[in-house]
Image (tube, helix red, strand yellow):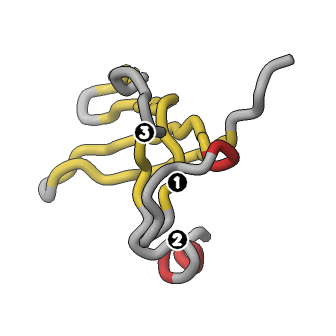
Amino acid sequence: MHRWLFDGPLRSSTLTPPPGAPEPEITLREIAPGVVHVVNASGGILPAGEAQVAADRASVVSYVLVRDGAGWRVSAFQNTRKTPRG
């Protein structure tokens, strides 16, 4: 579904902590043997060629990872942009 994003405008982008961020806010929860839910609440999309994450790209990203013979694979992910409180 999102292949066009990763092959196009998000190609070579990374999920990167913003400048001056504290330790990454990552939580891991095992759902079943070989299945984990990971939430990264401390990053944002850094497009290729840019030096730092723009404030409007700060995100909370949730992954479901499944272990198979080749290692860990992303089974599902969800990305939500952070919005300022107030």
Q: Secondary structure at mark 3?
A: loop
Which of the marked residues, 2 or 1, is nearer the chain's N terminus?
Answer: 2
Q: Residues within 10 Å of mark 3 (few under 14, many from 20)?
A: many
- Label 1 is placed on what type of residue? Ile
Q: Amino acid at mark 2?
A: Leu
> In terms of image quadrants, where is residue 70?
bottom left
Q: CA distance from mark 1 to mark 3?
A: 9 Å
**Residue holding disc 1:** 45
User: Mark 3 touching mark 2, by CB under 8 A?
Assistant: no
Q: Residue furthest right?
A: 86
Farthest residue to the left: give it.
69
Ranked by sequence position, the earlier of labels 1 and 3 is 3
Q: Position of residue 67 (x, y in %)?
A: 23, 45
- Closer to the chain start, of discs 3 and 2, is 2
Compare residues 65 and 54 and report the one nearer the observer: 54
Q: Which residue is mark 2?
A: 10
Looking at the rendered structure, the secondary structure element under dot 1 is strand
Cβ–Cβ under 8 Å for marks 2 and 1:
yes
* Total numbered labels: 3
Say which amino acid is labelled 3.
Pro
Q: Position of residue 20 (x, y in %)?
A: 42, 30
Percent x, y for residue 32?
Answer: 33, 26
| 80 left or right of 26 in image | right
Question: Would you say 29 lies left or right of 11 here?
Answer: left
- Lateral position of residue 83 relative to residue 32, left or right: right
For mark 2, give the secondary structure.
Answer: loop
Give the quadrant of the N terminus: bottom right
Give the residue number, with chain letter if any, for mark 3: 17
Quarter of the image containing the C terminus? top right
**Location of residue 68 with respect to 28 vertically, above or below:** below
In the figure, residue 81 lies in which quadrant?
top right
